[in-house]
Image (tube, rainbow, N blue to C red):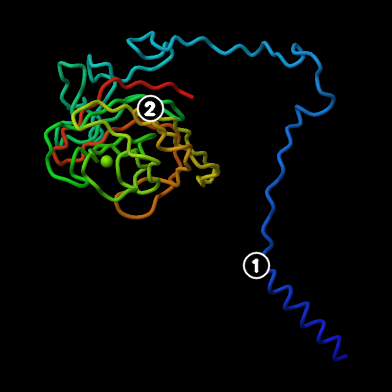
């Protein structure tokens, strides 16, 4: 009896221990089943001819790809509206093919809604330095209207690193700071995959973001954990397609943009 009780106690303790520390699952081994069976012995046996990818002229539209939707080419702000009231976008259209944030007129956003996209956008912070930290050349590119890739003049201007230039604001520190000097044009090439939600409005697949800043990879397919608020945790409201939005930081940032196009994915 004594041994029986002793064994029970031992079994119970073992069970408790394992309940608290479940065994770590080994990663599943990946097997590519399409490459199993008898290995082909001729080069032709592994050559495929369809589906044929579409042909894209990479510079057909003044340097933008032939299948890109041009959102801003310097000629007008017709593709944009003011985020606050939906009226015509009020930012300054410049002679050099760029536009500049008009202070305190609010963010602007595209009339068209997008889901997953490849985005090309160029931006410039002013050469004349004003203020520092988050108040120097701050703007932002909001994918799907919700997820900000930070635009900031970080040259000789440190700030919190999860809010520096190229960060997914307060969520992902960039892999590098790849800015050109203040007053010069930066490029962002962004690949954004939208999150997915179930019928109850719960997120079932996170969105992802890849950002290349002036040719340098700074966000490598990172998981978007939700919205990118200034204060508080990221939130995950269910959403479908949404506009691309550009930020008026309301502190006379004088950030300019040019050459904006997207390819829907
Ligand atoms: Mg910003």
Q: For the residues carrying marks 2 and 1, which lies nearer the camera in this image?
A: 2
Task: Check mark 2 vs ligand 1: CB closer than 8 Å? yes or no.
Answer: no
Left or right: residue 10 versus residue 144 is right
Report which residue position mark 1 lands on.
21
Residue at 20% x, 37% y is 137
Precedes in sequence: disc 2 or disc 1 = 1
Neighbor class of circle 1 (other Cα within 10 Å; few <14, some 14-19, many 20+) is: few
Q: What element carries label 1?
A: loop
Quarter of the displayed picture in which ligand 1 can be seen: top left
Residue at 47% x, 41% y is 222
Q: In which quarter of the image is residue 33?
A: top right
**Numbered tag placed on residue 215 in the rendering:** 2
Q: What element carries label 2?
A: loop
| 55 lies above or below 136 | above
Name the residue nearer the viewer: 199 or 110.
110
Q: Where is residue 51 in the image (x, y as percent from the top left)?
A: 64, 14
Residue at 35% x, 20% y is 261
Name the residue nearer the viewer: 158 or 114.
158
| 120 lies above or below 151 | above
Q: Quadrant of residue 157?
A: top left
Residue extending farthest right: 1
Name the residue nearer the viewer: 33 or 251.
33
Quarter of the figure that contains the N terminus: bottom right
Left or right: residue 1 versus residue 113 is right
Q: How many labels does the image show?
A: 2
Residue at 15% x, 31% y is 127
Residue extending farthest bottom: 2
Q: Position of residue 248 (x, y in %)?
A: 21, 37
Q: Where is residue 204 in the image (x, y as percent from the top left)?
A: 55, 44
Q: Where is residue 50 in the image (x, y as percent from the top left)?
A: 66, 12
Neighbor class of circle 2 (other Cα within 10 Å; few <14, some 14-19, many 20+) is: few
Q: In which quarter of the image is residue 41?
A: top right
């Amino acid at each position: 009896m004594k041994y029986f009780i002793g064994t029970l106690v031992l079994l119970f303790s073992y069970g408790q221990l394992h309940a608290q520390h479940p065994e770590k699952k080994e990663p599943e081994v990946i097997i590519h089943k399409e490459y199993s069976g008898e290995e082909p012995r001729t080069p032709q046996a592994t050559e495929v001819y369809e589906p044929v990818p579409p042909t894209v002229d990479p510079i057909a539209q003044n340097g933008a790809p032939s299948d890109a939707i041009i959102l801003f080419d310097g000629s007008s702000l017709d593709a944009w509206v003011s985020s606050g009231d939906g009226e015509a976008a009020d930012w300054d259209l410049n002679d050099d093919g760029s536009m500049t944030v008009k202070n305190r007129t609010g963010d602007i956003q595209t009339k068209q809604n997008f889901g997953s996209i490849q985005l090309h956008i160029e931006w410039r912070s002013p050469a004349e330095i004003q203020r520092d930290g988050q108040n120097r050349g701050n703007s932002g590119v909001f994918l799907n209207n919700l997820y900000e890739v930070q635009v900031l003049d970080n040259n000789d201007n440190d700030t919190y690193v999860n809010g520096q230039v190229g960060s997914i604001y307060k969520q992902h520190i960039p892999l590098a700071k790849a800015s050109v000097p203040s007053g010069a044009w930066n490029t962002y090439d962004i690949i954004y995959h939208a999150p997915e939600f179930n019928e109850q409005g719960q997120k079932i697949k996170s969105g992802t973001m890849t950002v290349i800043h002036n040719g340098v990879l700074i966000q490598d397919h990172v998981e978007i954990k939700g919205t990118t608020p200034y204060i508080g945790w990221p939130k995950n409201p269910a959403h479908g397609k949404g506009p691309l939005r550009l930020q008026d930081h309301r502190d006379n940032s004088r950030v300019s943009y040019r050459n904006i196009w997207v390819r829907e994915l």
